[in-house]
Image (tube, helix red, strand yellow):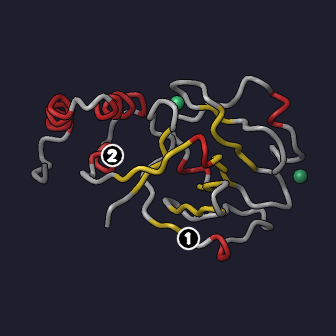
Amino acid sequence: MIKKFVACKNCGNKLSKVLSKQVDFKDVDLYTEQPLLEKSCYTILEDKYLYISLWDKWSLPYHQDNSRMIGCCGPYVYGLPNLICASCSQEVAREVTDCCTSHYVRFNLYTIQLLEDSDKFYEKIEKLSISEEQKKQLETLLLYNQIDSFKEQLLILNPFDKTQ
Ligand SMILES: [Zn+2]
Ligand SMILES: [Zn+2]
């Protein structure tokens, strides 16, 4: 099955880990103080929002405006985006970790795109035992279509993988 990932609509930067399963929005529980979704799952609310859980966050630093982090135990449901794209600083999502709601990252659909990891390159990157910084460097090669140098790097980092 082809996995997917969230990318910034403005610059193409990857904004989530690889996602393997779409869950129907009517099957998620917004009102418990638990992660909204299991790892690598996502759900879409109409044509407005795409939700992931916190452990699938990627390349999403907090907005400079601290007032967007206000809540009781964590930022509450309502308010402006508090997460930005690490690459172009576009406001893309709101992290919600308050009490009385579940915990999640909610992307505005018009600021992102859901792309397919059709060559499983991103999945391979995720499985490597390298630093987050090194992973982001590999992803940048893919973003700029440097497939040959990407494969070269991959081979250096993971010489035992014969699936390429
Ligand atoms: Zn609270
Ligand atoms: Zn961006």
Quadrant of residue 86 in the image? top right
Answer few, some or many: residues within 10 Å of disc 1's Cα (few below 14, many 20 plus, some between 14 and 19).
some
Q: Label 1, on which residue?
A: 23
Spot occupied by residue 39 in the image (x, y as percentages of width and height): 52, 60
Kindly identify the amino acid type of the residue bearing the numbered disc 1.
Answer: Val
Circle 1 sits in a helix, a strand or a loop, which is it? loop
Spot occupied by residue 137 in the image (x, y as percentages of width and height): 34, 27
Residue 148 horizontal side relative to residue 39, left or right:
left
Residue 54: image tag: none
Image: 138 above or below 115: above
Mark 1 or mark 2: which comes first in sequence?
Answer: 1
Residue 122: image tag: 2
Residue 90 horizontal side relative to residue 140, left or right:
right
Image: 108 above or below 149: below
Answer few, some or many: residues within 10 Å of disc 2's Cα (few below 14, many 20 plus, some between 14 and 19).
many
Residue located 28% across and 48% down the image: 124
